[in-house]
Image: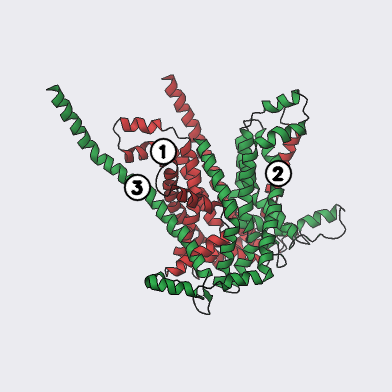
Chain colours: A green, B red
Amino acid sequence: MTNIAAAACSSAETAAQLPTRLAKGFVDRLVIIIPYLWLLFFFLVPFIIVFKISLSQTAISMPPYTPVLDFGDGISGLFAGFRELNFDNYTWLTQDALYFNAYVTSLIIAGISTVLTLIVGYPIAYGMARAPATIRPTLLMLVILPFWTSFLIRVYAWIGILKPEGLLNQVLLATGLISQPLVILNTYTAIFIGIVYSYLPFMVLPLYSSLEKMDYSLIEAAQDLGCPPIGAFWKITFPLSLPGVIAGCLLVFIPAVGEFVIPDLLGGSQTLMIGKTLWNEFFANRDWPVSSAVAVILLLVLTVPIMFFQQAQAKAQEQGK
Amino acid sequence: MNATWSRFNISSIVLGFAFLYLPIVLLIVFSFNESKLVTVWGGFSTKWYVSLFHNQGLMDATWVTARVGVISATVATVLGTLAAITLTRYTRFKGRVLFSGMVFAPLVMPEVITGLSLLLLFVAIGLDRGFFTVTLAHITFTMCFVAVVVQSRLVSFDRSLEEAAMDLGAPPVKTFFQITLPVILPAIISGWMLAFTLSLDDLVIASFTSGPGATTLPMKIYSQVRLGVTPEINAACTILIAVVAIGVIIASIANKRREVQRQRDEQAAQRG
């Protein structure tokens, strides 16, 4: 009797749970599917289109290209399309030294700027991590705050400082350090300053979070054993902060390679960077296929660092758990 | 600890913060300059702010930017929160690697690539460029930032709270809205603010995806900056900085107050 009652009870329970479970499965699926589809359609599909258009011919019309590979034509159309595929845009990129130089210059500028940002950012992050715990949140907020103010404005602010008749030259002339105004604006130096300045928070934050977690008794132990402070830094502090160094460098390097605003506003027309080349190809020359080819190559160049970045992110996520 | 916060550490922080803040301070100071020259001080004046409000083009652009920002940040917050839940809660499903790749890659993707690829998508599907396309583009790149912010909160979330609610018979959706959502709400709010400021700030992606009727404020500022530095742009920038700074300060005060309240509640609970 009790068995039957128990069985009835449990079956009633499952009957009541069933719709809930079904609902849960449905909700779970919805939670995954909505952002998934959005990113597929607005992030992945556009790259495929860029790749497709980079293989088409430039035309004077709107949109200014002759499409190839129309997927509507079915298999036969696809094969016909493949025969028409043309790599002219890529050949063009290899023939004109301008593009090659722009890629190489961008990588070099981004590399140097990343190292400079690390050199400037490390002491700040270190100082913050060693600050009294009570003022650390305030310091952290002060580092983040400039990041909230417009990127464009922060770059613009430097024009007034670096101009030949700008504030920096006025100060230096007034103090007698220089007798002739320095030409900084519209040079690569201005680009370095702009990148270091704009991307500094991206470097400081990951550095700070890895330095803050460090056990400083290790350094005391090293010093007790007679290790000089600089030696202790290179043997203990720096290796332990390496995850932060890697994350910070990738966060600065990858976007800096394709940077447009900084070279355009601070670098002037003399400097060459690939983001600016792509922009001009698109807006000034209206050559969509060539700018697509530039984008495809840039993406290929950045694939390895981006994959490193994703791995670092995934690892940080694992450790967070 | 205090003893080791040496003179070197203090000076590196002071110099670092001077470097971070001096350009912004100078920009604000010279927006109140009487002289038209941005670098020569000619006395205090607010005339550039007055002329700013008579600049119809700039006001229109501000209105477009504000609308794009609010709409895109709101949609991006919903999508980004869903993406964060997916990343932290569903560790096994088909295409998870691709999904996390699509969430993390836009964080570092050069803006010229994102802008160009989205524009080509809009042309391919026959959408007219304008307000709608800029909003879609901003949703797409800001939702990934929201996802990262919310995810970092979800990772440290104590799941036993949810399990307790479900053991007591609360259905999953109700559990989410009554337990999970209030706990991760500060992260969602800062995610929204981050999305909003990123949208407010964006020049490159907007330039690619916007059409004739939808010029945003950064596009307007950029086209004027190219013609030269003027105190009027300084004034526009100062207002923008003030709006964002006030928002951030209010949010952080609210956050702190909530944190204090939470600690008090926990202590009260421990005392029983």
Residue B167, image x and y in percent?
31, 30
Dot 2 corresponds to which residue?
Answer: B16
Q: Is residue B58 above or below residue A310?
A: below
Subunit of mark 3? Answer: A
Say which quarter of the image contains residue B47: bottom right
Q: Observer-nearest residue: B60 or A191? A: A191
In the shown orientation, is residue A96 left or right of residue A321? Answer: right
**Of all residues shown, which one is farthest toward the left?**
A1
Subunit of mark 1? Answer: B
Q: Is residue A263 above or below residue B159?
A: below
The amino acid at mark 3 is Arg
Q: Which mark is residue A29?
A: 3
Q: Secondary structure at mark 1?
A: helix
Residue B81, image x and y in percent?
43, 46
- Rounded to the nearest angstrom, the CA distance separating label 2 from label 1 is 37 Å
The amino acid at mark 2 is Gly
Residue drawn 65% across the image and 30% down it: A132
Dot 1 corresponds to which residue?
Answer: B182
Count of numbered badges drawn on the protein: 3
In the shown orientation, is residue B192 left or right of residue B50? Answer: left
Residue B16, image x and y in percent?
71, 44
In the shown orientation, is residue B130 left or right of residue A89? Answer: left
Residue drawn 24% across the image and 39% down it: A18
Residue A234, image x and y in percent?
73, 36
Q: Secondary structure at mark 3?
A: helix
